Image: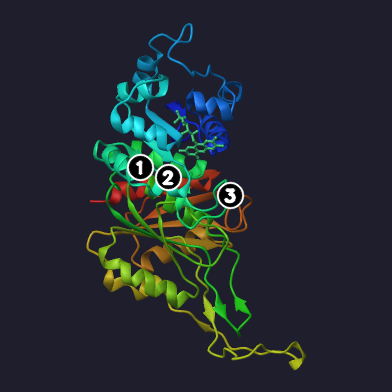
Amino acid sequence: MTFWSGRRVVLGVTGGIACYKSCMLARRLVEAGARVDVVLTRAAAEFVRPVTFEALTGRPVLTSLWEPGGALSHVRLGEGADVVVVAPATAHLIARMAQGIADDLLTTLLLATPAPILLAPAMNDEMFAADTTRANLAGLAARGVATVGPEIGALAEGPSERPGRMSEPASIMLAAERLLASTGSRLAGRRVVVTGGPTREPLDPVRVMTNRSSGRMGIALAEAAWARGAIVRLILGPGALAPHAGIEVERVETTAEMGAAVGRRLPQTDVLVMAAAPADYRTDDIAAVKRPRTGGTLHLSLAPTDDILAGTRSLRKPGAVIVGFALETGDALEKGRAKLAAKGLDLIVVNDALEPGAGFEVDTNRVVLLGSDGSSQTLALAGKREIADGILDAVETRLG
Ligand SMILES: Cc1cc2nc3c(=O)[nH]c(=O)nc-3n(C[C@H](O)[C@H](O)[C@H](O)COP(=O)(O)O)c2cc1C
């Protein structure tokens, strides 16, 4: 079961070059369990033929108000939808919507639907910066139409440093989830800080000590909290992965930097989830220049790094829910229980790095949640996003 299982999505596709990414969006939504009805504008059908979406969704694709059998589909489709997503949304579609123009199936449906609407604008950066486009989007926002992106990045016509590029399918799905889920969540509007990834401690200007954490669990937690409507800050150690748009990311390098970043945020934080794997040791003996290998055996004395949770205990906002992680290699539950008590946590997520499919560098996890109230709950092996949702469900029951 995912958030999308059984949901009904109308995917409007308009005539922008980013149409090619809409095929992937349709595919992902179907894979996640949604029923997807695609509506193409005439211009969109010049870019991608309806048969492509028909094959991807297993459902008829509509392109015109006047199709045989399609009479009143502009009303029926929109009435039955949980959400209407328009991706890409061209400048032309945005302008027509802003004016209430209903001259084709998609614009008529957008005017008639009671479902929430999410637009993923995509266009040349000048077109997006144009006063007319800005004013049209502001008018739509004032009427409750949500948008995701556009983002800064390469456009079909070349590189750009201004917004115009359509958000990626995963970001669009996450934004749609936030639009639908946030009203029902206790995390909506709450400040959530998540730490993720490893930290690394320098040995000399080129070498570091670190661990195998990829940041996947922290990113999954940040995205899951964001999808529930929280204001999320992800304090993320070094690594190649990054979360989807909308989540504020603060990059840190060392355990001390991570501790300082958590400390700065903690007084305003409603939920802190410490999913990072900070380096436990550092050396004071950091060489100013690269140590040569020819120097023979290298002896380094390592000192423990500061305990982030212990160091920030006095800064916790009253009533805040504090969640720690215990990644162990054997006797995980016992060690987790001890850590829960010693660090004054509300919840600890225990997993065993030696178990197949759990721990670092994999997409799945299997964890046990131990609560300060003596509770214990096992979350069976699942994707990290599902595990993240299980953890956040437990957090919500503890939020005042
Ligand atoms: C190759 C090509 C790429 C285009 N890309 C975009 C685009 O990314 N965004 C946009 O707003 N318009 C784009 N246009 C212009 C639209 O296709 C045009 O405004 C059209 O009327 C949009 O119709 P629709 O909004 O009904 O789909 C592009 C046109 C061409 C020929």
Graded by Cα atoms within 10 Å as few (under 14), some (14 to 19) or many (20 or more), the crowding at tag 3 reads some
Q: Which residue is mark 3?
A: 363
Element at badge 1? Answer: helix
Upstream in the sequence, badge 2 or badge 1? 2
Q: Are marks 3 and 2 in contact (CB under 8 Å)?
A: no
Q: Which residue is mark 2?
A: 127
- 287 over 335 or under it: above or below: below
| Residue kind at label 2, given as amino acid type | Met
Q: Which one is in front, 346 or 221?
A: 221
Instruction: Tell me which residue sits at (36%, 65%) in the image.
Output: 341
Upstream in the sequence, badge 3 or badge 2? 2
Is 204 positioned to the left or the right of 280 in the image?
right
From mark 3 to mark 2, how far is it between C-alphas?
Answer: 39 Å
| Res 254 visible | yes
Is 74 positioned to the left or the right of 244 in the image?
left
- 181 over 353 or under it: above or below: above
